[in-house]
Amino acid sequence: MADRSAIVTGGASGIGAACAERLAADGFRVLVADVQDELGRMVAQRIGGEFVRTDVTREDDIEALVDRAGSLDVFFANAGVFGALGPIEQTVADDADRTIAVNLRGTLLCLKHAVRVMRPRGRGSIIVTASPGGIVGGVGPHVYSATKAGVAGLVRSVAAEVREYGIRVNSVVPGAIVSPMTAAVLADDPADLDAAARAMAPSPLVGRPGAPGDVAGAVSFLASADSAFVTGSELFADAGYTNAPGPASFAKGKFAGH
């Protein structure tokens, strides 16, 4: 895969950085796209990739990013924000607009321009970061959850359109992941990952919060030829949080051995 290229938006830290590292290890030439210049350059230097400053709310930034990649094989649309927080009656409209602009409109623009360059080549894999918040009520901020529900619908809709062109579109659904993004909300400090880990309830299945590397393996699969028959799908990297959250009580204790 040495001649193949991949773009990772939100690639300067957390899930994005881990996935950029994994894709580089898989043999892709990786463009790290972010608004965090210093961190983005550090990630790109570490993996032998290239940093491209990109604001996903600006279509001209995304267009230039995709054109810079040249022969684009994988686009991981990962940039996102928690954005507007608090009770619904206290929602600040400007904060909501910003959240929608980054999470939903930004993803739409990434899909638009990724397909633009992949369609003539007849192949490509587009991966989008979704969230349990778009599926399960009450586990994410209101506007964030709405945008992630929209992202899930967008993935399915676009996957149906571009399937005939050899382009696959899927989403990865991370669970509770310790990252600068979660630390900024839970610990008021994006650098305090230990505090974020303590604040997160450990997964009932694996006894720990998730790490960005847990998501990177899923993204690596969706980027690879091993997922050639997979499109319009959600790959959950959440230790069962979304679809299997129960403790299986009726298979344990006094019920064991029945």
Image (spheres, rainbow, N blue to C red):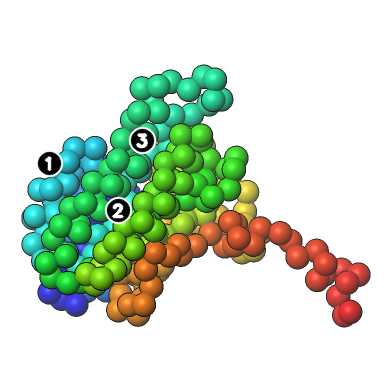
Please, what is the three-letter code of the amino acid marked with disc 1?
Asp
The residue positioned 21% from the left and 51% from the top of the image is 112
Mark 2 or mark 3: which comes first in sequence?
2
Q: Which residue is mark 2?
A: 77
The residue positioned 48% from the left and 22% from the top of the image is 91
Relative to 186, 17 lies left or right: left
Please, what is the three-letter code of the amino acid marked with disc 3?
Ile
Q: Residue 212's image quarter?
A: bottom left
Q: Say above or below: 113 vs 21.
A: above
Q: Say above or below: 247 vs 152.
A: below
Q: Which residue is mark 1?
A: 60
Comparing 65 with 46, the one in front is 65
**In which quadrant is the N terminus drawn?**
bottom left
Mark 2 or mark 1: which comes first in sequence?
1
Q: Helix or strand or loop: what does disc 2 sit on? A: strand
Q: Which residue is mark 3?
A: 100
Structural crowding at the residue carrying mark 3, measured as other residues with C-alpha within 10 Å and reported as few (<14), some (14–19) or many (≥20): many
The residue positioned 14% from the left and 54% from the top of the image is 66
Q: Do tag 2 and tag 1 residues touch (Cβ < 8 Å)?
A: no
As measured in the structure, the alpha-carbon distance from the residue carrying label 2 to the one carrying label 3 is: 15 Å
Whether residue 34 is visible here, answered yes or no, is no
- Camera-nearest label, 2 or 3: 3
The residue at the far right in this view is: 254
Image position, residue 172 (x, y; %): 42, 60
Relative to 153, 244 lies left or right: right
Image position, residue 81 (x, y; %): 38, 39
Mark 1 or mark 3: which comes first in sequence?
1
Image position, residue 153 (x, y; %): 41, 52
Image position, residue 188 (x, y; %): 46, 32
